[in-house]
Amino acid sequence: MHYFRIEEDNSSVYTGHVEGSHKWGLPGIRNCTVCRATWGTDTRAYPSVDLSPVATLADFEEPRAEPIEEYERLCELARPFLPQGALLQPGAALGPLVGRAQGRFGPLVAPYSWTLLVQHEALQKLQAEGLRGLNGCRTQLRFRQRNSPELLELEILPMGRLHPDCLPPDRQPPCPRCGRRGLTRPDDMLLDTSTIPSHMDLFRLEDFSTVIVCTERFVDACRRLGLDGVTFQPLPMK
Ligand SMILES: [Zn+2]
């Protein structure tokens, strides 16, 4: 099986533009007690999560950095609502994508390299092909036009890692407290075959969550069904 990276197709005829953020999220952390880093990123998103039952117990709306103890407390509040296989990190995004959208959209839409949206009908076609791991979640996007499409966000779980051969040899292990790796994504990525899930046709890398990966089966189905709007770049493996 071959694997591909999914990215926005800048050459496509679609003019659609999405501007939004997820309804809830975990804060970033300030001055980790072990590695001393202040950081957070919203590149891991779980749009199926409904935090309404605990939203009043803490602030999941204001993006900010907190001491790691507070971050860990909020993780425990959110954890019962996460999908199976979810991994948290400071700044993780939760709940539906809320915002505005405008223009003409293809069947697949990648507003950021770490976010993949799909029109409802296209998702049904992909699911009918038997592709695994496709969970379309409702968005709350306001369209400034008539005949607006129904855009769903795919919930993409982190799994699979890059091969050590494409990473700096002198890298440090992840911080044992906050999980920070502090690595820049290499230009020449090499997937680590031994970490690739065998039961999913779509996932994001666990160590570089901006990278969305799909199987050859996913690419073939999109091509056969004429589902465009994104590009598929082959990822070498080892
Ligand atoms: Zn740390």
Image (cartoon, rainbow, N blue to C red):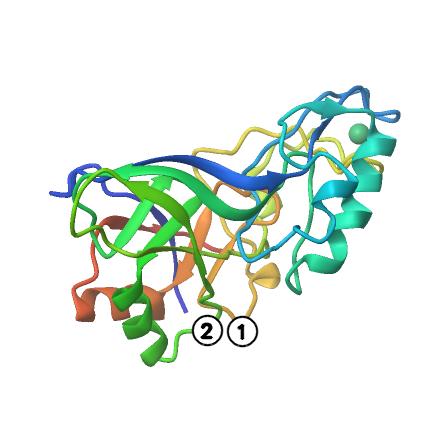
In the rendered image, which quarter is residue 225 located in? bottom left
The residue sitting at 88% across, 25% down in the picture is 33
Where residue 83 appears, as percent x and y from the top left, is 64, 62
Q: Residue furthest left?
A: 13
For the residue carrying disc 2, how many other residues have a C-alpha within 10 Å: few (<14), some (14-19), or many (20+)?
some
**Label 2 CB sits under 8 Å from any ligand 1 atom:** no
Where residue 144 appears, as percent x and y from the top left, is 23, 38
For residue 229, side relative to residue 61 (left or right):
left
Label of residue 132 in the image: 2
The residue sitting at 20% across, 51% down in the picture is 106
**Label 1 CB sits under 8 Å from any ligand 1 atom:** no
Instruction: Inspect the image, locate mark 1, and give the three-letter code of the amino acid beneath it.
Output: His
Where residue 92 appears, as percent x and y from the top left, is 63, 40
For residue 58, side relative to residue 136 (left or right):
right
On-image quarter of the N terminus: bottom left
For the residue carrying disc 1, how many other residues have a C-alpha within 10 Å: few (<14), some (14-19), or many (20+)?
few
The residue sitting at 82% across, 39% down in the picture is 72
In this figure, which residue is indicated by the disc labeled 1?
199
Of the two numbered discs 2 and 1 in the rendering, the one whose residue sits closer to the viewer = 2
Where residue 52 appears, as percent x and y from the top left, is 66, 51
Q: Is residue 130 visible?
A: yes
Q: In this picture, is 126 found above or below 164?
A: below
In the rendered image, which quarter is residue 70 located in? top right
Q: Residue 237 or 214: which is nearer the viewer?
A: 214
Where on the image, by quarter, is ligand 1?
top right
Question: Could you tell me which secondary element the residue under label 1 belongs to?
Answer: loop
The residue sitting at 68% across, 51% down in the picture is 87
Q: Is residue 17 visible?
A: no
Kindly check if marks 2 and 1 are in contact, taking CB atoms under 8 A apart as contact.
yes
Label of residue 93 in the image: none
